[in-house]
Image: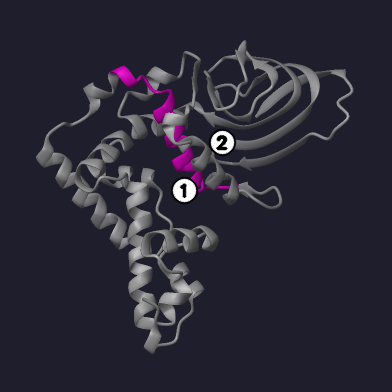
């Protein structure tokens, strides 16, 4: 989806790697590790935008924006790419059809999608964000691990990552205009969202999918969940899965069943993080619960 002309300005002395994921649905995702000194110029497909998330910056810039750690950059429709990169830089890039990005942006923020298509935007994720983008990106990358593949549908974890990026680069001063501040309505939305989560507890459920089902923005859903439960919908889903797994582990003492089977049965996709979270929340490991611990 992009055509770049790259000039090597000096020998890097190291390898550079690009992991590419292509889709027939109007999007592509790359994870790039550059260890070189290059100058690049080019453009991306007509009617597309580019999103960059920088994990490790360096002496580099794209379109005049310094690529520092935590920088999130959106290049709008029609932008030309100019880049100068020196040293080791790690970033992820998404190329999205403009209408797909506009829909994701509107679903996440509640703001009109067309407002984000014409102007470049850059933000930097700070410590106060709790590395939310980095966490979402890591989860998305795990769904693309392995050999390069072609996707017809966008993985849920990748959709949630794009939603998190949209929230970051949105006009935060305008959020208040798009939020329903009624306490009664927020509590109703939180209960409705909880019902959807419980009905789908046995499978991965992107927050953006809940938003689309309910017809609310991700920003509004976060607002509602924090009002009702004190945590966001993603964390609440995780906590419900931990509690349901504990109930099933206790019941499995007199029945057949393993920790892995039970965890996978409540939608857990990463057993290592599951065990760590479980022990932090309940003070014992899943296997201790299964064997009749405290």
Disc 1 crowd rating (10 Å Cα; few below 14, some 14-19, many 20+) is: some
Q: Residue at x 58, y 14 (%)?
A: 79
Q: Is residue 82 visible?
A: yes
- Residue identifier under label 2: 27
Decide if residue 177 is on the left or right side of residue 156. Answer: left
- Is 93 drawn above or below residue 214 in the view shown? above
153 falls in the magenta region: yes
- Residue identifier under label 1: 156
Place of residue 72 in the rendered image (x, y in percent of width and height, measured from the top left): 53, 25
Task: Specify the quadrant that holds the C terminus.
Answer: bottom left
The magenta segment: 151-173
Task: Specify the quadrant that holds the N terminus.
Answer: top right
Q: Secondary structure at mark 1?
A: helix
Label 1 to label 2, Cα distance in Å? 14 Å
Please tell me the numbered disc located at residue 136.
Answer: none
Viewer-nearest residue: 268 or 162: 268
Hey, which quadrant is residue 267 in on the image?
bottom left
What is the number of callouts on the image? 2
Hey, which quadrant is residue 31 in on the image?
top right
Hey, which quadrant is residue 231 in on the image?
top left
Disc 2 crowd rating (10 Å Cα; few below 14, some 14-19, many 20+) is: many
């Amino acid at each position: 989806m992009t055509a770049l002309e790259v000039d090597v300005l000096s020998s890097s002395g190291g390898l550079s790697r690009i992991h590419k994921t292509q889709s027939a649905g109007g999007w592509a995702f790359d994870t790039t590790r550059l260890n070189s000194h290059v100058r690049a110029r080019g453009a991306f497909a007509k009617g597309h935008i580019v999103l960059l998330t920088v994990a490790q910056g360096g002496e580099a810039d794209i379109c005049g924006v310094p690529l520092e750690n935590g920088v999130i950059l959106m290049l709008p429709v029609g932008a030309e790419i100019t880049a100068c990169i020196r040293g080791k830089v790690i970033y992820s890039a998404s190329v999205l059809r403009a209408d797909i990005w506009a829909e994701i942006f509107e679903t996440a923020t509640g703001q009109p999608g067309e407002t984000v298509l014409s102007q470049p935007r850059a933000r930097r994720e700070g410590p106060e964000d709790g590395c939310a983008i980095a966490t979402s990106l890591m989860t998305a990358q795990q769904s693309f691990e392995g050999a390069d593949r072609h996707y017809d549908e966008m993985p849920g974890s990748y959709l949630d990552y794009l939603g998190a990026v949209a929230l970051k680069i949105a006009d935060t001063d305008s959020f208040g205009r798009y939020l329903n501040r009624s306490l009664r309505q927020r509590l109703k939305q939180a209960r409705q969202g909880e019902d959807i989560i419980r009905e789908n507890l046995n499978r991965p459920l992107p927050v953006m999918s809940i938003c689309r089902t309910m017809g609310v923005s991700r920003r509004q859903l976060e607002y509602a969940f924090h009002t009702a439960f004190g945590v966001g919908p993603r964390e609440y889903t995780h906590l419900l899965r931990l509690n349901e797994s504990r109930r099933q582990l206790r019941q499995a003492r007199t029945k057949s069943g393993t920790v892995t089977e039970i965890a996978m049965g409540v939608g857990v996709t990463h057993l290592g993080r599951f065990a760590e979270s479980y022990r932090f929340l309940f003070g014992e490991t899943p296997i201790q619960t299964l064997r009749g611990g405290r």
